[in-house]
Structure formats: C-alpha cells, structure tokens
Amino acid sequence: MDALDAAILGVIQGLTEFLPVSSSGHLELGKAILGDTSLPEESLLFTVVLHFATALSTLVVFRKDVFEILGGLFQFKWNEETEFSLKIIISMLPAVVIGVLFEDQLEALFSGNIIFVGFMLLITALLLWLADKARDTGKKVSYSNSFVIGVSQAIAMLPGISRSGATISTSVLLGNDKTKAARFSFLMVVPLIFGKIAKDILSGDLAASSTEFSILAIGFVAAFLAGLVACTWMISLVKRSKLSWFAVYCFVVGLAAIIFAYAQ
C-alpha cells in the first residue's frame, strides 16, 4: 500500500463511517480494487487506525454532548447523563465479548473476502429497508434496548454489516425516535474504538516500521479530516432521509461486489 492508496482509503472511511453503508465493507472493497495485498493482521490494523480517526472526529463534532455527559458524571449523582452513560456501557458488552473471544476469526475476515462483504451488504440493505417501514416516535432508548442495540453492534463487526445501519435500524425497529437512535449510535462506538486502540498499544500490536507508520499516519489524517466534514452534514442527512435510499445503495454495491468477486 502506498501513500495515495492510504489517503484514498482514509477518505472512504471518513465519508462512509457516518452513513449506514458499512465503512468496513467499503474499506475491504477499496483494498481489493486498489490491489492491496496486506496480511489480515496488517489490514485489520489499518482499519482500526482509520476507525480511531473517525472516532476522534465524532468527539469533535459531538463535543458539546460529550462535555455534558462528562459534566453530569462528575456530579457523582444519578441524573440523565449518568443514565445515558450506563446505557452506553450496556451497549458495549456484546461487542467486547465477541471481540475478545473471536478476535482471530474476525481478523481473518479482513483479508479481501469480497463475496462475504457483498452478502453482508445485502443483509444491511434488508435491515435498512425494514427500518424504513417502522413508524417514527419520540421514545428514548431504554436499558433493554441498549443491550439489543449492542448485539447489533457486535454483529456489525463483520465487514459489510453497517455498524450505524445495524444499530440505527435495530433502535428504530424497537420503536425509538430516529434522531435519538442516531445520536446513541454514533456515541456508543467511541469507547469501543478507544478501548481497542489501548489494547493494541499495550499488547504491542501497533508496533510498525517507519514506512508503515507513515502510511498509517496518512490514512489517519485523511480519515479524520473527511470524518469532520462528513459528520457535520451526513448525520443530519441520515436523520432526515429515508433509510430505503441507503438500502438500495447497499443492495447495488453488495450485488456488484459479488459479481466482481466471481468475475476475477
């Protein structure tokens, strides 16, 4: 992978992280089109770094929400911020368990398995189509909802399953307000990304040569800047738009990926 490829993939990550179209799936498709031949571990490392960049962009855009949550927590009493934080923790549990128990199996999937990504995109399309049929409400995410949404987030660790698409769709299908579902979806992933980075740093998995580091840095900067731009206007797009539009997009891309893979 050269610097241009890293920049392109960074932009892809930044633009697709906040839309329900699977950023990991688009990264795998992008790597295949660009002819990336990284080992699964190296490929997953690059993906994690790009997700870290968009997690930072999420914190920048949602800084007011984050400061309000932290301010409420440091009051050390039961309030709305404490309740929201507890729901975030509950939503993290399924992904943490899956990530710990099946880390090697997940790494193996980040190796250009385009047919798998294609079929997962078709599943994402189905989820979005079903969610689009659900009635919008003013209901907040409950504790039980948080766990179910967390299960969707764990399943979305598979490349091709959109994390935001799966979590927002699940939340809407549970009867939650679309705007509240989107806010919860974008904030719930931030602790997981930082936790993954911390784990990799402590285990030494992020050790890289100066050449590899420069590639990771280019991808990181591209994803962060693209994420800042995307997060400011794409989030409102997700809230206002019909999810069926994204369902059609995922269906077309998924079908194209499967055809592309079989044509090789």
Image (cartoon, rainbow, N blue to C red):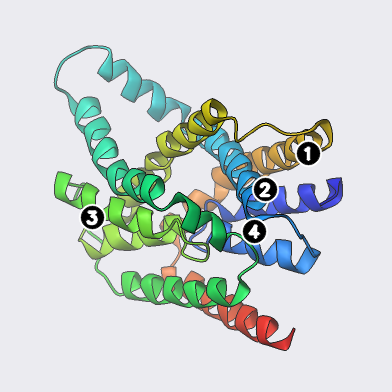
For mark 4, give the secondary structure: helix
Name which quarter of the figure residue 125 lies in.
bottom left
Quarter assignment of residue 222: top right
Q: How far across and down, in percent of the image, does residue 13 sit?
A: 63, 51
Q: 14 and 158: which one is in front?
A: 158
- Relative to 67, is 46 on the left or the right? right
Q: Amino acid at mark 1?
A: Glu
Give the distance between the C-alpha atoms of the residues marked 1 and 3, in whole angstroms.
Answer: 38 Å
| Mark whose residue sits in front, 1 or 3 | 1
Q: CA distance from mark 1 to mark 2?
A: 9 Å
Q: Of tags 4 and 1, which is closer to the observer?
A: 1
* Residue wearing tag 2: 42
Q: Which residue is mark 1?
A: 212
Q: CA distance from mark 4 to mark 2?
A: 13 Å
Q: Is residue 177 visible?
A: no
- Name the residue at 50% across, 28% down: 198
- Mark 3 — residue? 148
Disc 3 versus disc 2: nearer the observer: 2
State which mark lies toward you, 4 or 2: 2
Q: Give residue 236's position: percent from left, percent from top.
A: 48, 51
State whether residue 41 is above or below residue 64. below
C-alpha gap between disc 4 and disc 3? 26 Å
Q: Are marks 1 and 2 in contact (CB under 8 Å)?
A: yes
SS class of the residue under badge 2? helix
Q: Which residue is mark 4?
A: 27
